[in-house]
Amino acid sequence: MSSDAGSDEALYHELMYYTLAHPSPTFIHQHAVDAYAAQHATETSKPITDVFAVIGLYLYLEKDFTGKQVQKAHMQMAKHRKHWPKLALPSERGSVVIADVLAAPAGAERDRMIRQWCVAVWSAWSASRAQIAALARDELGVA
């Protein structure tokens, strides 16, 4: 990632303001939250944080879930299970970073950049795809 954690955190807050105020009923905010969490996962991250972020990207990009549907899936998963597997952290986290998203003009261009960010981060986690797909099937019944 090209920027440091401190500046990324400030950018994250700026992007959260944008996504929470977004008028779309699909709740784009959830996708931005998941992309950020997956891209910033560390050895000390809680397994639930990493799993929920990566499964959120999987549901969005491979199963066409809206942000609202991903949020509901997270709530369903949290009710049924308390212990989550530790995912293997990828060495690279995606070629698109939060600064790239915020560099795009607000509106349709920024919304497209949020999706591109999600795609880049999900691609970086591709080694965990089978594990995430199995969790989605077992926990949510998503085939």
Image (cartoon, rainbow, N blue to C red):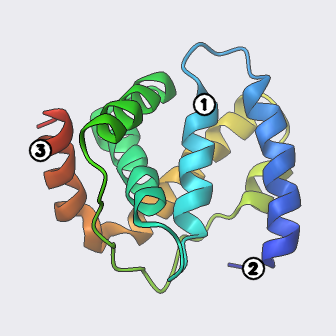
Give, as a three-letter code, the residue at label 1: Ile
User: Residue tagged by mark 3?
Assistant: 138
Q: Nearer the viewer, mark 3 or mark 2?
A: 3
Sequence-wise, which precedes: disc 1 or disc 3? 1
Quadrant of the frame with the C terminus: top left
Image coordinates of residue 91 in percent, x first then y, are: 47, 86
Image coordinates of residue 48 in percent, x first then y, are: 41, 57
Left or right, 40 with reference to 88: right
Taking the spot 38% from the left edge, 69% from the top edge, the residue there is 125
User: Residue tagged by mark 1?
Assistant: 28
- Using the numbered discs, state the Cα–Cα distance from disc 3 to disc 2 in whole angstroms: 36 Å
Taking the spot 30% from the left edge, 39% from the top edge, the residue there is 77
Task: Check contact, mark 1 vs mark 3: CB within 8 A.
Answer: no
Please rate how many residues cluster around mark 2, counting C-alpha atoms within 10 Å: few if below 14, some from 14 to 19, many from 20. Answer: few
Sequence-wise, which precedes: disc 3 or disc 2? 2
Sequence-wise, which precedes: disc 2 or disc 1? 2
Relative to 99, is 88 above or below? below
Please rate how many residues cluster around mark 1, counting C-alpha atoms within 10 Å: few if below 14, some from 14 to 19, many from 20. Answer: many
Taking the spot 50% from the left edge, 61% from the top edge, the residue there is 120
Relative to 129, is 142 above or below? above
Quadrant of the frame with the N terminus: bottom right
- Using the numbered discs, state the Cα–Cα distance from disc 2 to disc 1 in whole angstroms: 24 Å
Q: Nearer the viewer, mark 1 or mark 3?
A: 3
Task: Check contact, mark 3 vs mark 2: CB within 8 A.
Answer: no
Relative to 122, is 135 above or below? above
Left or right, 133 with reference to 122: left
Numbered badge on residue 2: 2
Disc 3 is placed on an element classified as helix
Disc 2 is placed on an element classified as loop
Looking at the image, which is closer to me, 70 or 119? 70
- Using the numbered discs, state the Cα–Cα distance from disc 1 to disc 3 in whole angstroms: 25 Å
